[in-house]
Amino acid sequence: MYDLWRLLLTVVKLYEAVIIIYCVFSMLYSFGVLDTRNRIVWQIGRFLNAVVEPVLTPLRNILPSFGNVDLSPLVILLVLQYLVEPFMARQMMSSLMG
């Protein structure tokens, strides 16, 4: 059971990294640094969109609008960091102890 919790914790950490990469990619795209006519850039953006947007969209509907500032990735990262990861670490330790 310990290995399962460790795997889930690794998946959560990878998802956090994907969210951060999505934010950086989105910022570079909006400032015109990245060219979406490039097929590789377009495919990376599409992949990141498909992985991150299903989680962010419901949260965007709940959060108030702050103009052009999107706080939903920050909220998701905080929830993962301060609620999900400690829960999984606690479960991992309890399965290790017995």
Image (cartoon, helix red, strand yellow):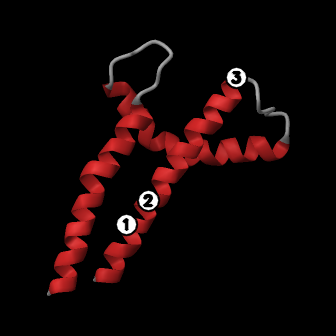
Label 1: which secondary element: helix
- Amino acid type for the residue under numbered disc 3: Phe
- Residue at 39% from the left image edge and 44% from the top image edge: 77
Q: Residue furthest bottom?
A: 98
Q: Which amino acid does label 1 sit on?
A: Leu
Image x and y of residue 30, in percent: 67, 24
Please say if the residues under marks 2 and 1 sit with CB atoms less than 8 Å apart: yes
Please say if the residues under marks 3 and 1 sit with CB atoms less than 8 Å apart: no
Q: Which residue shows up at 36% across the image and 74% down it? A: 6
Query: What residue lies at 70% left-to-right and 47% top-to-bottom?
Result: 44
Is residue 8 shown left or right of residue 90? right
In-image side of 30 versus 37 (left or right): left
**Disc 2: which residue:** 13
Q: What secondary structure is found at the residue carrying circle 2?
A: helix
Q: Which of 70 and 37 is in front in this view?
A: 70
Q: Depth check: give the residue in front, 37 or 32.
A: 32
Residue located beneath label 1 in the image: 9
